[in-house]
Amino acid sequence: MSGTGQGACGDLLNKDMPIAALAGVYFDSYPGSNGNPNQNPLCGKKINVTVGGKSVQVTVKDRCDSCHGSFDVDLSESSFHQVADIAAGRVDGSWDFVDPQDDIGMKPGDIDNVPPPRPTSPHTSDGAAPNGIIATNVPRSSTSPDPESGNRSPSHPRRMSRIMRNLAKDLDRAKRSGTKKSASKGRKSGIRPRRLSRVMRGVVIDDQN
């Protein structure tokens, strides 16, 4: 939330304001929400955000479309500076409403019952990016991976399509059988693998390793 633009609540925002955007799932499911983000009861609510013993009070002015966790919060640049190094981009922390009576939104046990998130709002501020996000711990929810990271989890290897699996099998059989010449026809009798483009060869080899 480092840029300037119009927030989901309808106000013009900038990086120097003490403001925050709450995760889209939480924002959309808050009691009283009627589908018009400008009229969402969360708009104008104040929350305290805490990171490593440091706290900052901010006002909810936007919906965070980049937040992966259902309870994540995206802070303006100036507010994030007060609790963490902006270079970190995403840190673990917690938040709560300044007024306990405002805490009527979804709880961790309600996550499976909330409606699916709506498409990105055209009113979301330009800065609603994965920059300055507080990934909170449940009950204001689990940490989220950095969406900018290109790293894949080792427990989720890249899956190959059926065609590419067949291509890999052809290559493997061709390597095992060799390229022997036929005594009767003078041709190679080994299994001829399908020819692959350079890109597809790279993918097959990458998945076999």
Image (cartoon, rainbow, N blue to C red):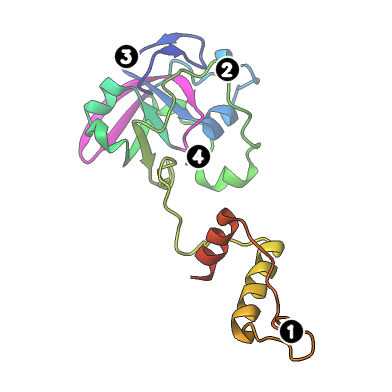
Q: Secondary structure at mark 2?
A: loop
Residue 36 appears in the figure: yes
Q: Work out whether mark 2 precedes mark 1 in sequence or the reverse, and give the earlier one.
A: 2
Q: Is residue 64 magenta?
A: yes
Q: Would you say 136 lies left or right of 123 here?
A: left
- Within 10 Å of disc 4 (Cα), the crowding (few <14, some 14-19, many 20+) is many
* Element carrying mark 1: loop
Visible in this render: residue 158?
Answer: no
Q: Position of residue 171 (x, y in %)?
A: 62, 73
Distance from disc 3 to disc 4, alpha carbons, whole Å, reads: 24 Å
Q: Give the alpha-carbon distance from disc 1 to disc 3, as whole Å.
A: 80 Å
What amino acid is found at the position of numbered circle 1 in the picture? Gly
Residue 22, position as x, y percentages in the image: 46, 28
Q: Which residue is mark 2?
A: 122
Up/down of 109 relative to 131, above or below: below
- Numbered label attached to residue 186: 1
Mark on residue 70?
4
Q: Nearer the viewer, mark 4 or mark 1?
A: 1
Between the residue at mark 3 and the residue at mark 2, the CA separation in whole angstroms equals: 21 Å
Question: Which label's residue is closer to the chain start, 3 or 2?
Answer: 3
The secondary structure that most of the magenta stretch takes on is: strand
Residue at 46% x, 8% y: name it: 11
Q: Nearer the viewer, mark 3 or mark 2?
A: 2
Residue placed most toward the observer, 119 or 9: 119
Comes first in the chain, label 1 or label 3:
3
The amino acid beneath tag 3 is Met
- Seen at 59% across and 80% down, the residue is 175
Q: Which numbered dot is residue 17? A: 3
Where 140 sits versus 161, above or below? Answer: above
- Whether the residues at callouts 4 and 1 have beta carbons within 8 Å, the answer is no
Query: Marks 2 and 1, how far apart in space?
Result: 68 Å
